[in-house]
Image: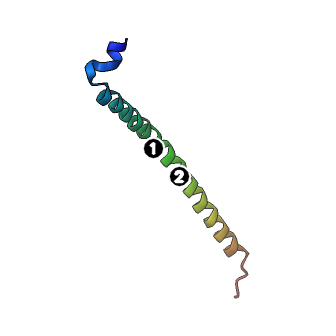
Amino acid sequence: MNQFLAMGGYAVYVWPAYAVFLVVLLADALAPVLRRRRVLRELRGRLARQAARQQRHADTPTDA
């Protein structure tokens, strides 16, 4: 097992490469989830502002 983990003397290069690969893979998997949450939060805010604006206009008396 030690021989495998030593990677023939190249462990210093191989294991960090695996670590970087896993970090990039996790970031690639999480990015769409985080982006979706952000977009949904922004859309909810826009809809709330739009509904409040429409409510203000509906409550405003019109002079005829």
Query: At 38% across and 38% down in the image, what residue appears?
Result: 24
The residue positioned 71% from the left and 79% from the top of the image is: 60
Residue 53 rendering spot, x and y as whole percentages: 64, 71
Q: Nearer the viewer, residue 13 or 27?
A: 13
The residue under label 1 is which amino acid type? Ala
Q: Secondary structure at mark 1?
A: helix
Work out whether 16 lies above or below 7. Answer: below
Whole-number angstrom distance, CA of label 2 to CA of label 1? 11 Å
Counting labels gives 2
Q: Position of residue 9 (x, y in %)?
A: 27, 22
Q: Amino acid at mark 2?
A: Arg
Residue at the spot of label 1: 31
Query: Image point 69% across, 69% down: which residue?
Result: 55
Front residue (pair 26, 59): 26
Question: In the drawing, does residue 48 fall left or right of residue 59?
Answer: left
Q: Looking at the rendering, in which quadrant would you find the N terminus?
A: top left
Graded by Cα atoms within 10 Å as few (under 14), some (14 to 19) or many (20 or more), the crowding at tag 2 reads few
Residue 18 as seen in the image, left or right of residue 50 = left
Q: Residue at x 54, y 48 (%)?
A: 37
Residue at the spot of label 2: 38
Q: Are marks 2 and 1 in contact (CB under 8 Å)?
A: no
Q: Residue furthest top?
A: 1
Q: Return the x and y of residue 44 as percentages of the image width and height.
A: 60, 56
Q: Secondary structure at mark 2?
A: helix
Which quadrant of the rendered structure holds the C terminus? bottom right
> Which callout, 2 or 1, points at the residue further toward the start of the chain?
1
Where residue 31 appears, as percent x and y from the top left, is: 45, 44
Q: Nearer the viewer, residue 53 or 58?
A: 53
Colour logic: rainbow
Tell me the tag on residue 12: none
Nearer to the camera, 63 or 35: 35
